[in-house]
Every structure is written in structure tokens, then in C-alpha cells.
Amino acid sequence: MGFPVVRMRRLRANEGLRRLVGETKLSVDALVYPLFVTHGQGVKNPVPSMPGIYQWSVDNLLAEVAEVAALGIPAVLLFGIPREKDALGSEAYAADGVVPQAVRAIKARFPELVVITDVCLCEYTSHGHCGLVDDGQVLNDPTLEFLARAALAHAEAGADMVAPSDMMDGRVQAVRTKLDAHGYSGVPIMSYAAKYASAFYEPFREAADCAPQFGDRAGYQMDPANAREALREIELDLAEGADIIMVKPALAYLDVIRRARERFTCPLAAYNVSGEYAMLKAAAARGWLDERRAVMEVLTAIRRAGADIIVTYFAKDVARWLGEKGAH
Ligand code: PBG
């Protein structure tokens, strides 16, 4: 049977009908808000390529976190900007590093907020790579112990979850083993399992001051051309003990999110990265598109592709919009 008996427009006739048949609902429950934390006091440094996003000192961070919690956002993801960078990324695994300090401060004031920490070396190394470097090479195996120590430092400070983003082989196992050996078997790992070597991280590298000082990350992050390989990465991370797996970036990789969703039963996160944020912000600032509609469309699409969790710099806006009467 077809037209004229069938008319697809019938169920689009008004807002109520559209709400009833909407297949994908965006909810504040799915959102994780990334935060950049830096040393000092009273710091609120704007990130030029990411309007609305700042580097916060711990004191100021608490006010921002209060806003996040009040909006009902369940989780934040912390990135640290160290006082000093060195070849070994020492502050990444220092007990008094900026991230452990922030974790302690947040958990003391907002015990019910889920605090996730990024586990990587690139923000902390002078060369800007995610692992140790020797003779121009990013070393895999020697890096693992340092990543594991970083995860442990975060867990000891009270982090609810750790999120390794470095793309070294075997890091999930190294982190799991270290956490378990120190009594943190209850701390879950959200693994950036399928993380691509993407042009869309550029604004983040300004925010976290972590651009590689030589070469690029193509030797450890994934080739954007590959999707089957992403499934293999995810499979391996799950076998090593990952609790939540992530695909990153989101928008150019919706097919990867969909394939991961169909293949695996674990919770799936997608990272709506800095470049995706910057593109919409830049276009909206010029009046070239309606920011609210574009953001809701993009995040709904990431959910439709199959992500349970969305890490996004738009989390506060979306929570606000969802909370407004008549917002869907
Ligand atoms: C660090 C890290 C990066 C991002 C998250 N963790 C940058 C990179 O790999 O170069 C990117 C996040 C974003 O762009 O929003 N390893």
C-alpha cells in the first residue's frame, strides 16, 4: 500500500504527535562536561578557539562545577595543565598534581557528581606526545607504567572513573592491574578505545596546551580511513578490562559509533570534540546557523548513531535547553 492511503506527513502534523513518535531522546543523563584545570588562584583563562570554555584554577573551578551539578549533569571529565612540563610528564602522576587537587576539591563539595579524569601524558610532556619519547619515537611499553601511575594518583585523590586517551597498546590492562593492586578494583575505566588522528582536536590543543612539538600522533592514534580496525581496538580494550568504550571524534565517525553499538553490549561513549564545538560556535557567531537547533541536531544524531554517553562542551547549554518548558 502506498500513497494516497499512506501519508507519512500525518504523524508530523503537530508538536504533540512528533513528540510521541520521536525515536531518539536526548537526555541530560547522557552528558559529560569536560573541564580544564590549571594552577594558581582566581584563574579563568578563556580558550580563544572555544568560546565559553575556560582554563580554571581549582578555586574558580568549584563555582563552575556547582553550575554543572545544579543543571543535573551527572559527570565531568578533568584535564590538567601542569605547572611545568618535562620529558617524562612528571606532573601527570604526581599525587599533588593539578588534577588530583581538583578531584579532591570537587569530591569534597559535590560527592555525588561523577568525576572522571583524563589519563594521558601529552598535557604534561615538554614534547607534547602522549607517551615517552626516545630518538624521535613515541615508546609504547615504557609508557604504560607512567599511565598506570597517573590513573592511580587520580584514584587515590578520589576519582570515580579514569579515562585513558593516549592510544598506547596495553594501557587498559596496565591501568586495571595497577588500580586493582592498590585496592581500587571498584574504579571503572572508560577507554578512548577508537581514537582517531583527527584534525578536530586543534582547539583542544590550545585549551590543554598539548600540541606535539614534532611530528604528529598518526603513529599511535587511528587512521580516519579505518572502521574495522576500530572494532578490533574496542575488542582488545574490552578484553583488557575496559568498562566503557569511546569513539572519538563523534561527527565524522557516526558509522563507527553505529558499528560499535551493533557489535558490543557495553556502554558506549562518543566524544563531541573541540573542533566540532568550534565549528558550530564560529558559524553561530556569524549568524550562519541557529546554534541551539544545530547543537540539538548534532547531539541527537550522535545518540541515534548509538552512543549512550556524550562528552561535549555543549553539555551546560543542552542541559539548560532540555530543562526549559517545551524543549525536546
Ligand atoms: C589527549 C587528548 C586529546 C583530546 C582528549 N584527550 C588531544 C589529542 O589527542 O591530541 C581531544 C579532545 C577534544 O578535541 O575535545 N590525549
Image (tube, grey):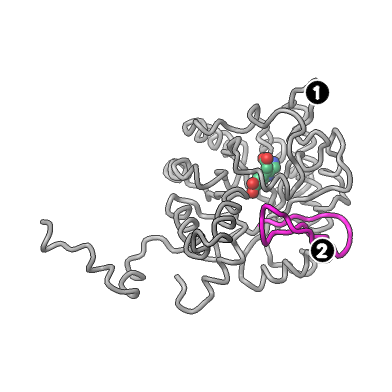
Residue annotated with mark 2: 105
Rendered location of residue 135, percent (x, y): 80, 20
Q: On screen, 134 above or below 73?
A: above
Magenta region, residue range: 34-57
Disc sitting over residue 81 in the figure = none
Regarding residue 42, the answer to whether it shows in the image is: yes
Name the residue at the top extreme: 135
Q: Residues within 10 Å of mark 2 (few under 14, many from 20)?
A: some
Label 1 – label 2 distance at C-alpha: 36 Å
User: Residue 33 in the image: x percent, y percent?
Assistant: 64, 59
Q: Position of residue 97 (x, y in %)?
A: 86, 50
- Label located before the other in sequence (1 or 2): 2
Image quadrant in which the N terminus is located? bottom left
Quarter of the render that holds ligand 1? top right
Residue occupying the far bottom of the picture: 325
For image coordinates 44% across by 70% down, the residue present is 328
Would you say 205 lies left or right of 312 here? right
Q: Residue at x 36, y 70 (%)?
A: 19
Q: Is residue 222 left or right of residue 77?
A: left
Q: Secondary structure at mark 2?
A: helix
Kindly identify the residue that appears in the image at 57 percent across and 43 percent down.
248
Amino acid at pointer 2? Ala
* Kind of residue at badge 1: Asp
Residue at point 66% right, 38% down? 172
- Place residue 205 in its image quadrant: top right
Magenta stretch encompasses residue 46: yes
Q: Is residue 165 in sight in this rendering?
A: no
Residue 60 at x, y percent in the picture:
81, 66
Residue 171 on the magenta span: no
Q: Toward which corner of the image does residue 234 lie, by quadrant?
A: top right
Residue bearing the label numbered 1: 134
